[in-house]
Amino acid sequence: METYDLIIIGTGAGGGTLLHKLKDTGKKILVLERGGFLPREKANWDSKEVFQNERYHTKEIWKTKEGKDLHPGTGYWVGGNTKVYGAALFRLRERDFEEIRHEGGISPAWPLTYADFEPYYTAAEKLYWVHGKMGIDPTEPFRTEDYSYPPISHEPRIQELHDALVKDGHQPFNMPVAIKLIESDMLNSPCIRCNTCDGYPCMIHAKSDADINCVRPSLANENITLLINAKVERLITSTDGHTIDHIEVSYNNELIQFKSAIVVVACGAINSAALLLKSANEQHPDGLANSSGQVGRNFMKHNSAAMLGISLKENPTKFQKTLAVNDYYFGDKDFPYPMGHIQLLGKSDREQVSPDAPFFTPGIILSEMASHSVDWWFTGEDLPDPNNRVEVIDGQIHLDYTENNMKGFDRLIETWKEVLAKIDGRYVFVPHGIYLSKDIPLAGVAHQVGTAKFGTDPATSVLDIHCKAHDVDNLYVVDGSFFPSIGAVNPSLTIIANALRVGDHLIEKLSSL
């Protein structure tokens, strides 16, 4: 049984970033990833393979609360889901850290404030090459400095929409996007500003993900060991249950064990909760670190919708994910509750449009729809509900989830339809083909958070403010599990920033080993 100073389980936005933070400590660190390196192949940029055939999603099956099969839209790779994310990296708003009343209930306050995260947001944006410009977003939280990388320019059709929105009194802004683009020197730019970014793996490694920006650079250090295709099955505690003694890992069809002074779980909010629940023992009968009963509960994934806005105007845009709108984030003059966030998706093609079309629709019609569409993504806040939960039954993950807080979100979409019809002429909204319906189904778990929330009271939270388990002295959880609420913007940057924050704490802990 080999012994390490620290073990990190998972290499996504949380685990991969934490590894990068700790790589220069000189401590012996083992990183375990249940998947391998995502292959670099032509299919990376094949929309049929990526979206219809779900080439890079896991083939495992989960269950819904009704016992129906659930095919989750998640993948197990070095870099986790950042390998295929849209790379839109937003900060939560200052008010998102406070208690907020929604039409559907209360979004609780965090045990820390935005000010506690601000320096780590800045560091995270630099590490992931986030492009943006401060001072435009009307809900933007305070920043100690502007983005290190300039905003990504709009292509003509999107600039036309931007200008029309401004003329109509809106405040659109350049979306903060994490790609390695150098528009002033495209000859030497790693990113070529293509139309296969949002939702695709990047064949040329120009998207800033946890693999390329964090894991691979860390492997140059001799103190780092990465084991791929290694699935952690259980965490085994000491006889008194106060510490993790060792972990059990499936590797090459064998069950092997590793010891470590500190263990960090970063499997994603759903799989981290599942691992803690599967690690139940006599001292932790309801699951590891679960004396509060909150492990697996309060699962959130956002109220989300993807829509095609089809107009008479052709849209030849290639890299479309450049514009966002937060004018309705906290409501409007007739609705004093939060509504949500609007951003552009990557540009769709006929393969992405076709799943929602009747089987007899001619291909030329699908191509025309795609060539005239502007693709929009909406997110609203779903509220933490202890009944929305992750369970493990007979070794299989079950998701019990009922949507909530939909009134403001529905109002957001209807309002935006009216806005676009006003500024852009005849406009028809249809569900985005790859999602088959307006609302993203339960399988869309890209924004998963909340299953092991942090707090100051061990009776009502799983983790303390450093993301250490209240019940287990050497166990940390560093992914989206810690969120008490989700806000209405993509959670990735907050997960990354938190990993850097917890990394500072762990550097102090490791220094005493």
Image (tube, helix red, strand yellow):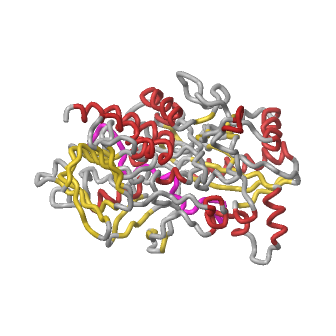
- Which residue shows up at 19% across the image and 36% down it? 513
Q: Nearer the viewer, residue 333 or 149?
A: 149
Start-end of magenta stretch: 435-459
Look at the image and say whether residue 5 sits in the magenta stretch: no
Toward the top, the furthest residue is 144
Q: Quadrant of the N terminus?
A: bottom left
Look at the image and say whether residue 457 sits in the magenta stretch: yes
Task: Tell me: residue 240, above or below residue 423.
Answer: below
Expressed as whole percent of the image width and height from the top left, the position of residue 333 reads 69, 35
Q: Nearer the viewer, residue 413 or 221?
A: 221
Task: Tell me: residue 408, above or below residue 110.
Answer: below
Q: Nearer the viewer, residue 457 or 133?
A: 133
Expressed as whole percent of the image width and height from the top left, the position of residue 43 reads 62, 63
- Which residue shows up at 67% across the image and 47% down it? 412
Residue 495 falls in which quadrant of the image? top left
- Which residue shows up at 56% across the image and 66% down it? 55
Q: Is residue 125 visible?
A: yes
In this rendering, the count of numbered labels is 0
Q: For this view, does 283 lie left or right of residue 158?
A: left
Q: Is residue 459 visible?
A: no
Expressed as whole percent of the image width and height from the top left, the position of residue 228 reads 38, 58
Expressed as whole percent of the image width and height from the top left, the position of residue 337 reads 59, 40
Q: Main secondary structure of the magenta part?
A: loop
Task: Tell me: residue 382, above or below residue 504.
Answer: below
Toward the bottom, the furthest residue is 360
